[in-house]
Image: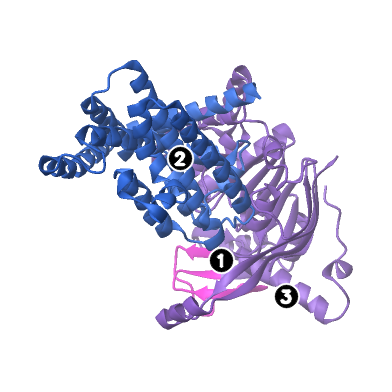
Amino acid sequence: MITRLRREIGFVVHLVKLNLAGLMEYRATFLTQAIGMFINNGIYFVFWLMFFDRFEEVRGYQIEQIYLLFALVAGGWGLAFTFAGNANRIAGLIAQGRLDYYLTLPRPVLPHILFSYMNPFTMGDLSFAVIAYIFAGRFDVLSILLWLVCAICAAIICVSFMAVIGCAAFFMGNAVQWTFYLENALITFSLYPMGLFQGVARLLLFTLIPSAFIGAVPVEIVETHSFALLGALAGAALAGIGIMTVVFRIGLRRYESGSAINVNI
Amino acid sequence: MSTVVKLTHLQKTFRVKHKASGLQGSVKALFSTEYRTVEAVKGVSLELQEGDLLAFIGPNGAGKSTTIKMLTGILFPTEGEANVLGYVPWRQRRQLAYHIGSVFGQKPQLWYHLPPVDTFELFAHIYELDRAAFERRKTFLIEALGIGDWLHTPVRKLSLGQRMRCEIAASMLHGPRILFLDEPTIGLDVVAKQALRDAIQQLHDAENLTIFLTSHDAGDVETLCKRVIVINHGQVIFDDRTSALKRRFLRRKVIGVRFGQPIPDDFAVRDATILKHGTWGAKIELDTHVRPVEDVIRALMDYAPVVDITVEDPPMEEIIREIYRADESVRVAGVGPVEAEIPLEKAE
């Protein structure tokens, strides 16, 4: 089991290296995309700077918490799609019959798909997360470690969520637009203090659209060093992996392939 | 020789949305969606022995690719059974994948922006190949397929023919026992096609490799395969030796000739039909059983100085139409299935 796991990890590492090599083929494009995303995040952040210039806090969040929130959300999002860049492209891959390549090879299909593409834009998110964390100013070792672990858990939740909604393509054909809307919902709600949402909205953000586990809960963990919450976050990440695996397996039986001309990029 | 592939009444149906044309049809489909069932493969049964080089041919939409996809575990069948090297492909896909290779002409496996050697390295990881064995295998394939010069060139800069040879090398790295080739010569020019055919033949001879080839090109079938199965509308309509196919259906040849001097309006060739007639040349169709090709070519060369000459097979669609017509006429005549009328020779 451990040997098997080690082999699969080795394979994923090789995929990541290959993806990086592919990105390096177009260095200028890669750099402009990463820098573009960094600037994009920065523009979004300006809104909060202006907000806190006029108000002291919003539902318990001050500018420091917003820095931390961005460090965590951008970190989770960046890790997710830098390494598992196909997570938000699954719907398109299914609809265009592009899983054939993965299905003819002796590797677990889902991880192979997920890690076969690296999104250069999200490298901008990763670098933005580091800068935001520096502004958050929590330099003790435990906080840094918790930030990293929380970002990894958030990344797993992002990937699982995107993969699950992408699998809708197995059942409804074209689900590209649907994944686009839900992806926006996930990221948008994760960038607001959770105190803004109550009742059903709050319940939704902890379940169907798990934005709370990407933003608010990790912020709480890094702030309070709560290991109970960390356990809950890890549990949510594991549940995400479980749901994603089951949904993908069920969907795969309905896969219809296709005659579209494909290219591995 | 052992049986490596056995299909029994394999079927695959797809549910396809049916919509009237135009915007009105699209709006109507929003409220009441009609579906129709398309039977892509209708009860295909066949067997393949180790070392067979089989051509699985048919027109577009005949069910060739769907059958290959079921044999490689990509698709689940609706009904029927399949056994490939002792595995049920759709249930034991991963175990089977270690023993088969596949090349889909329209679905490349090489990474587009990277050189082929990088994909080879990835495949070494995927198939968990021993380093020394991988290097030996790679060297053998580079030589056999003549790809040494392009190994470090990004795939996007390779020609289609060069890319296809690298695709085949990638799919052979793990030493598969069966190679599935789905339209490998699609889009290639004459020279590239021949080079690829030679490479496939060489690999087959060197390793007693079983090859399951689908193609639209009668030339692929004629030069490579000993046995041919023709599929149309999801059903096998012909299963015999290629020599039998040639004898019965690849009899017609089309000769294009261009002379060094003008030819008269009443230009004619004995036992052949003039399809097209120009001032300097003509297109001639002949039945090779009535008059051999070399005989006609000799006659043309004796007639006047020849500047250019080509000999072509009829397109695959036409051959299949002929086979299908033969099949239909036998059925209509009420003498049972085509196999009853035309005794099959056993494939090698």
- Disc 2 sits on a residue from what chain? A
Judge whether residue B123 is colored magenta. no
Q: Residue at x 38, y 48 (%)?
A: A186
Q: CA distance from mark 1 to mark 3?
A: 37 Å
Which secondary structure lies at badge 3?
A: helix
Give the foreground label among 1 and 3: 3
Q: Which chain is purple?
A: B
Q: Residue visible at 58% across and 60% down?
A: B311
Among the chains pictured, the one given blue colouring is A
Task: State how the image is colored.
Answer: by chain
Mark 1: give few (<14), some (14-19) or many (20+) Cα within 10 Å: few
Q: Chain of mark 1?
A: B
Contact, mark 2 vs mark 1 (Cβ under 8 Å): no
Residue occupying the point 63% across, 51% down: A250
Hey, which quadrant is residue B219 in on the image?
Answer: bottom right
Name the residue carrying label 1: B303
Q: Position of residue B304 (x, y in %)?
A: 52, 64
What amino acid is found at the position of numbered circle 2 in the picture? Ile
Amino acid type, callout 1: Tyr
Q: Residues within 10 Å of mark 3 (few under 14, many from 20)?
A: few
Q: Which residues are magenta?
A: B255-283
